[in-house]
Amino acid sequence: MSSFLLKADSIQKSYPMGAEPLKVLRGASLTVRRGEFVAIMGASGSGKSTLLHIVGALDVPDAGRVVFDGDDVFERPTRFRERMRCEHVGFVFQFYHLLPELNVLENVLFPRMVRKSVLGWLGERAEARRSACEVLEQVQLSHRVNHRPNELSGGERQRVAIARALVNQPQLLLADEPTGNLDARIGKGILDLLCGLHDRGQTIVMVTHDSRTAARADRCVILAEGRIKTD
Amino acid sequence: MYRLFLTLRYLRKRRIAIFAVISVWLCVAMEVIVISVMGGFLDTLKERSRGLLSDIVVDNASLVGFPLYQEFIDHLNREIPDLVAAATPVIYNYGIVRVGSESFTKPVRMVGIRLDEYKRVNDFGNSLFYDKYYPGTTTFNPQLQPFASYSDNEIPKLPPDMEAAFERWRSANPNAPELEKWERRAGYRFPGPGAYESIHDRPPGYYGEEEDFAPGVIAGVNILYHRDRSGEIVREVWRGHQLVLTVMPLTHGGNLSAEGATMSVVRLADDSRTRVYEIDSMCVYIDFNRLQEWLAMAPAELEYGGFTHARASQVLVSLVDGVDLKTARERVELEWQQFLLGWEGPLTGEDIDQLSVVMVETWEERQVQFIAAVEKEKILVTLLFGVISLVAVVLIGCIFWMIVYQKTRDIGVIKSVGASSGGVAMVFVGFGVAVGVLGAILGTTTGTVFVWYINDIQDFLVSIHPQLRVWSPDVYTFDRIPNVVKVPEVAWISVVAVAASILGALIPATIAGRVWPVAALRYE
Ligand SMILES: Nc1ncnc2c1ncn2[C@@H]1O[C@H](COP(=O)(O)OP(=O)(O)O)[C@@H](O)[C@H]1O
Ligand SMILES: [Mg+2]
C-alpha cells in the first residue's frame, strides 16, 4: 500500500468568462499522505475551493489527474466517483449545507442511506443509527439529534456537517473553510475537533485563508496563480 | 433507500405539493363522475332499447313494408323452433293524434302490433300502466270509457271488472309502496289509476251506445302527459278518453293512396312508459290488423285480377334463452334466403323489390346509430375532461419545477454524498408517483361517493331551490341519474392519473438530475 492517499497532478481548470476563459488552476499539484493534516491557504478567489472539489471528485478538471488510493479518479466511470464521494471522502462546507427537511440524526444518517436499497437499509438501519450516534457523540451533539438544522447555531450546524462527513468512515476528510463563517471562539472549537480527529488518524485536507487556522495543520501549502507554491 | 425517504419527506414538508395532489384529485373525481354518469346513461339506454326491439329485427326500412311476413314467421317456427322463442310482425307509419274535442294535435309514430305476441318478444308489457295495476284489462278491442262512482259511504268505486283486476294486483303485491298513496278515502276522488270522471247518481260502470265503442290504443306516456318537478307523471286524460288518429295510407307501389288520409276515433286503453324519450314521446300502439287495414297494407284485390299480399314493416324475433345472438342472426338470415328461394306463390315486381332489401339485424346492430351517437358523446366528454386534466399535468410540472429550483442546493448536497443523477431524478419521479397515487385514491373515493349519492345531492339541491335541478326527469325520462361506478373504468382513470403525474414530474426531475453539485454548493 502506497503511503500516498491522494495525489493531484498538474490540475488545470478554467471557467468560461467572456472572450478569455478564466484560468483558475494552471497545473496545481498536491500530494497527501495517509494520516496527514494538510492546510491549503490562498487569497480569496485563488481557486482553493475549485481544487478541493476536484480532488473530492465533485468537479472535473480540464487537464491533469487525481489518483486516490491508487485509482485514477477521472479515468474511472461515473459510478466509481459516486461511490468515492459516498464512501471514501467526506465533505465539510463553509456554509454547512445541511438538508433543512431532515433533523440532525437524519442528516447524519443520510450518506449511509445513499447506496442502500430499501431492503438493504432495513437490514442495516440499527447498525447505521448506532454509528451515527457515535459520530454525533464525537462532535458533542448527542443531545440534539431530533432538532432541525434551523434550530441550531452556526457552530452546531458545522458539527453536524462534520458528523455527516464522518459517518461512512471516509479515508479522506475535505473541509472547505469550515470555520470561515463562524466567530473565532466557535471556530476554534471546530478546529479542535478536526485536530482531535487527526490525532486519531484521520487524513484531512482543509482550505482556509487564515494563517492561524492553517498553523494547526501538519503542513501548509499555498495556492497562488493557479499553482501550489510551497510544499 | 434515500429516494423513498426523500420523496416521503418532501411530500410531507413541501406544502405546495398539496396543490399538485388537489389538482390530480379533482381531475380524477371529475373523470370518474363523467364516465360513470355517461356510461350509466348509455347502459340504461342499451338495455332499454334491447327490451324494446327484441333480439333480432327483420325489416326493409321502408314505410311500404314487405309481404310474406306471416309465411316467414311460420317458416321460422317450423324450421328453427330450437332458436326462436317467438316472432311477431309490426307495422310502422306516421300519423297525427288529436285529443278528443280539444284542438291539441301532435305528430306520432303509429305502431301496429299484436299485443299478446308483442309482449312476448320484448319488455313492452312491463311499460304499460293500467295493465300493471289492472292486469288483463288493457285491450285493443272496441271499448267504452269506464266510470267510477261513490259508494254509500262516499268511498269511490270502480266498475266491478276493474275492481276485480285491481284486487288481483293488490293481492299479488301486498307490499307495493303505491298502495298507501292509493288508499281510498271517503269524499275524495280515487287518486290512483283509473281516476275516472264520477257521476254521483250512477253506479260505476260503462255507459254508452253502440256507436260510442271505439278501438283501444296505447299511447307513449309523453304524448299525452307531462311530469311535475318531482318527476311524477300527471295524468289528466284517463283511460277511455277519446282520441282521433289520422293516418296516410300508401299504395302497394309506395304512393299516397287515392282515398287520402283516414281519420278514426279511438279510445285510450293504456299508456306505455319505456323510458326512452324518443319512443315515449312519439309512439302510439294500435292493433296490427286494424292499422294494416287503415294503411291499405292488408291483402286487396287488384284491378287486373289477383291479390296483393298483406304487408308488415318488420318482424321481431326473440330467441330462446342462452342462444348466441350473432349465430342466431346468421341462422335467421339463412332461413330468410331459404324461405325466399323455396317460395312458390305468385309475386309482383313490387313484392320482389320490397323483399330484396329486407335485412336481418341484431338489436345491437339495429340501434347502432342511436347508441353510437351517445357513445361518441361519452368519448368526447371524456376526452374533453382529459384535456382539462392536462392542466393538472402542467400544474404538477410547474410546482415540481419550483421545488427543484428551491432545492437546487440540497440536490447538490445529495450528490456530494454520492447520489447519482438518475437517483436524484428518481426522487422527483417518485414524488410524481406519490402525488398521482394520492390524488387518484382521493379522486376515485370522492368521485365514487359523489356518484353513489348523486341523486341525494340533487334532491338536496332541489330542496334549496327547484331551479337547481340538473337532471330533469322531464327531459331524460330517467327518474334517477345513473349512479353505478365501474371498477375497470376507475382503474383506468387511476392509472392514467398516475402516468400523467409522472409525466408532469419528468421534466423537473431531469433538471434535478442534471444539477451540477459544485455550482449548487458554492454559495450559501
Ligand atoms: N462556475 C463558475 N463559473 C465562473 N467562474 C467561477 C465558477 N466557479 C468559480 N469561479 C471563479 O473561479 C475563481 C476561483 O474560485 P474558488 O475556487 O471558489 O476560489 P476560493 O475558494 O479560493 O475563494 C473565482 O474567481 C471564481 O469567481
Ligand atoms: Mg472558496
Image (cartoon, helix red, strand yellow):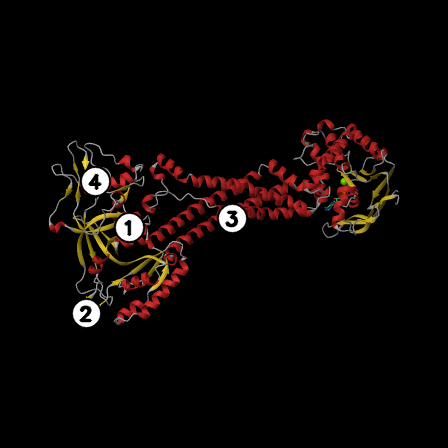
Task: Label 1, secondary structure: give it.
Answer: loop
Q: Position of residue B216 (x, y in %)?
A: 20, 51
User: Which labelled disc corresponds to residue B302?
Assistant: 2
- Left/right placement of residue B502 relative to residue B108 reads right
**Mark toward the start of the polypeptide (1 vs 3):** 1
Measured Cα–Cα span from mark 1 to mark 4: 30 Å
Q: Is residue B370 visible?
A: yes
Within-10-Å neighbours for mark 3: few <14, some 14–19, many 20+: few
> Height in image: B173 above or below A146?
below
Report the residue marked by disc 3: B492
Report the residue marked by disc 4: B163
**Mark toward the start of the polypeptide (1 vs 2):** 1
What kind of residue is marked 1?
Ser
Measured Cα–Cα span from mark 3 to mark 4: 55 Å
Residues behind callouts 3 and 4 on a single chain: yes
Report the residue marked by disc 1: B281
